[in-house]
Each structure stands twice: as structure tokens, then as C-alpha cells.
Image (spheres, rainbow, N blue to C red):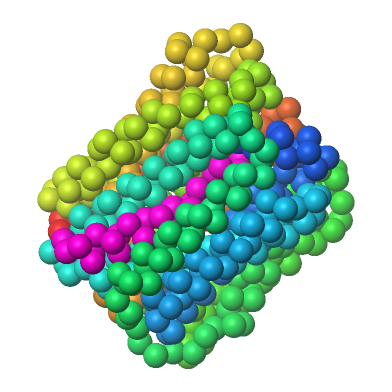
Amino acid sequence: MTKRQRLTLITTIIGSGIVILDGTIVNLALPKIASGLHANFAGLQWVVDGYLLSLSALILLGGSLGDIFGRKRTYLLGLIGFGAASLVCGLAVNDVMLVLTRILQGIFGALLVPGGLAVINTNFDRSVRGAAIGAWSAWSAIFAAIGPLLGGYILGIASWRWIFFINVPLVAICFVIGSGAIDESHGRTRRVDILGACLAALSLAGLTYGLIEGPAAHWPVKAYVAIAAGVVAGSLFVWHELHSKAPMVDFALFRSRNFTGSNIMTFMMYGALGGFTLALVVYLQTGLHYSAIKAGVSLLPLTILLFLFSKRIGALAGRIGPRLFMTLGPIIAGLGMLMLLGLHPGVSYLSAVLPGVIVFAAGMTLLVAPLTTTVMTSVEDENSGIASGINNAVARIGGLLVVAVLGLLGPAHVFRFGMILGSSLAILAGLVSWFTIQNKPVS
């Protein structure tokens, strides 16, 4: 790997990482945001899901924009916009302003995550690409895991607003490195699918609004209407993409069995991950009365295991095939979530929380690198941007919808419901992988 390639890898890791970081770090700050901005549980769900909504709806468009207009140019634009939106998030004066600026963050984040992976796919030849993707996926998972830890530290010494302000210097560093290190590349020429992006956004917005506002308002008619509208818009999106001459989602990619299987399990597994992290860090603070920093430190084993073993697991999966790792990983993670069901006030961290977190972390460590590599090696290089966009969209949509349904049984039942739902999805994801993933070496 050349010096230029190492710098490219660093900037894609940081850029994609801050987008992922903001999907987890905010969870820990929710109790303080609720207090500072006088937000209810539905409002807090929107702080999380407003970001996931725009990120999920537009990440497909972000991947194709990189292919059309240049992956480097699109990636750098995403950096600038994300940094500016983060600054405004930190200046929010009420929950409505915060939700709106979180939506803006998600819009620019939709350029960064698929853009970063597509840059790797086109700036590294096949001899080193597997290692680069493994490092990117490992560090991406670490950013997700370190979110609660970093957030807890920041909340312990400063206002919740600094969880957004911290993005600004990271973006600046990333922009400077990326401007000089990344080589520009393009995919095949095609039009921007504006109608497809609008239908995707309307579908997710309708479903999210109905699932969040329904339980909060005792299921008024407008909640059912929103869900129905979301389903109709989603159906129209699929029809449009199948008949468009320049679709945002190329359904021909799903002819690959590995691409299809890995995306199905991505939806389930990252839905489980989103529900698990939100429910756990909130319950640790509100149910077990942990401080923000203690709740963040409680997930440190996840960061440690991902950091130590993800690259090795990625290399091993490349030699013997991904199916075993993509099967056992989710099932083990699901068992870890089930182990946490018995948490109640007064229990010890070492005996009640830590074992479940370690088992969950072990499962995620087995899964992350093989999954990302399988997705990216199941398509041709010219489709790397949209393939990355599809997989990232599937992951964010999974998290979006699971977070949206956490309140279905009421705020008092969020933790137990989250653990049961998350473990069920994770175990099912493992079974899906066993029956769909072709066990071919990917490097």
C-alpha cells in the first residue's frame, strides 16, 4: 500500500466514521437533550430518526451521484455540508430546529458513506483492496461502538452541544487530506434519478412518521394514513426503478446471490444494532441511573474487540469464504442481547451487563468485515458506488424502522422490547446468511 493510498484510506475512514458516529453518539445525549430542549420521547425518536431518515432515503442517490459526477468531488462536497450542518445542530434552540438540522446532516452524510467505500474500491487495486475494505469496515464499526464512550466523556465535561461541534475539526482535517490524496474516478454515464429519490424519501418519511407518532398520540387516523402512504410510495418506487431507463437502484445487481443475501441480513442485523444501542444506553441512564460517561464506558468491550480482531477476521474470511462468519456472528450477537433481558435496578455491571455486551461484541466482530467485503466483491467495479449506496441504505433503513417501532408498547417497555426484537432479528439474520451466502473466497 502506497503512502497516497494510506492517506486515502485515512480520510475515507474519518469521513465515513463521523457519519456513523453521529448515528450512535446522539443516543447517549438524549436524556440531556430532552431536559435542555423540553422534548418528549417521540421528540427524541425524531432526533435520531430525522437523521436516519434523510440518510437512508438519499444514500442511494449519494452513491449514484458519485458515479456520475466524480467520487472525489462528491465526497468532498459531502464533507463540507456535513461539517456546516453539525455546527448548526450544536446551535439549536429547540427540538424542532435540532430535528431539521439533523435531517440536513443526513442529507450530506448520504454523500459520505457510499462515497468513502466507492473511493476505496477505485483507488486500490484488487491485491490490496480486501485489506483496505477490511480496515474501513473495522474502523467504521469502531466509530459506531466508540460513539457512546466519546459521547459520555463529552457529556461529562461539557454541554450536549459539543457532540456536534466536535465534527467540525474532524471534517476540516479529512477535507485537507482527501483533497490531495484521493484520485478522481467516474462510473458509467447516467441521469440523476430525482423521482426515485423523492419516492424513496416519501416512503420512509410516511412509515417513520406513522410508527413514531402513532403510539405517542394513541394511534390517530393520520398515523395510519402516513403508514399507508409510505407503503404506496415504496411500491411506486420499486415500479419506477424497474421501468426507468436510468434507475437509481439497478435491480440487476440483485441477480448476484451474495449481494441479495448480504443485503437481506444487513437490514435485519443493523436494525437489531440500532435498536440495541438506543435502548441499552438510554436504559442504563434512566433505569440503572448510570452517568453518561459510565453508560458510554459500558460498551467499551465492543470497541476493543472490533479494533483487535476485525482485520484478522476479514483476512480469514477472504481465504475460506464468508458464510460461516456471517452466520455465527449474528446468532452470537443475538444471544448477547438475550443475556441482557434480566437487567434491573441494583444489578452489578460486571455480573449482569458485561457478559452480554462481550457476547454481543464477539458476534459483531465476526460479522462486520466479511459482510462489507462480500457486498463490494459481488458487483463489478463500475457499480461500486451504487452497490455501496444500496447496502448502506439498507443498513440505515433497518436502524430507522427499528428505532421507530421501539415505542410501540410505550416508553416503559422500550428496553425489553428492544432486546427481544433485536435478538430475534439478529438470529434470523444468521439463518438467512447460512441459506443464501455462497461460500466462495473473496480475496
Query: Where residue 332 appears, x then y in whole percent?
Result: 36, 32
Q: Nearer the viewer, residue 358 or 307?
A: 307
Above or below, 426 relative to 15: above
Residue 397 forms part of the magenta stretch: no
Question: Magenta residues: mostly which secondary structure?
Answer: helix
* Residue at x 57% of width, y 36% of height: 154
Q: Is residue 216 left or right of residue 89?
A: right
Q: Nearer the viewer, residue 113 or 87?
A: 87
Which residues, given as a range, are shown in magenta? 1-27
* Residue at x 73% of width, y 60% of height: 100
Does residue 418 show up? no
Residue 31 lies in what quarter of the image?
top right
Q: Is residue 321 left or right of residue 413?
A: left
* Residue at x 61% of width, y 63% of height: 84
Q: Is residue 175 left or right of residue 6?
A: right
Query: Where residue 103 appears, x then y in whole percent?
Result: 66, 61
Where does the C terminus fall, quadrant-wise? bottom left
* Residue at x 54% of width, y 83% of height: 193
Query: Where residue 219 appears, x then y in whole percent?
Result: 83, 47
Where does the N terminus fall, quadrant-wise? bottom left
Please give the count of numbered marks on the rendered protein.
Answer: 0
Does residue 412 show up? yes
Residue 12 forms part of the magenta stretch: yes
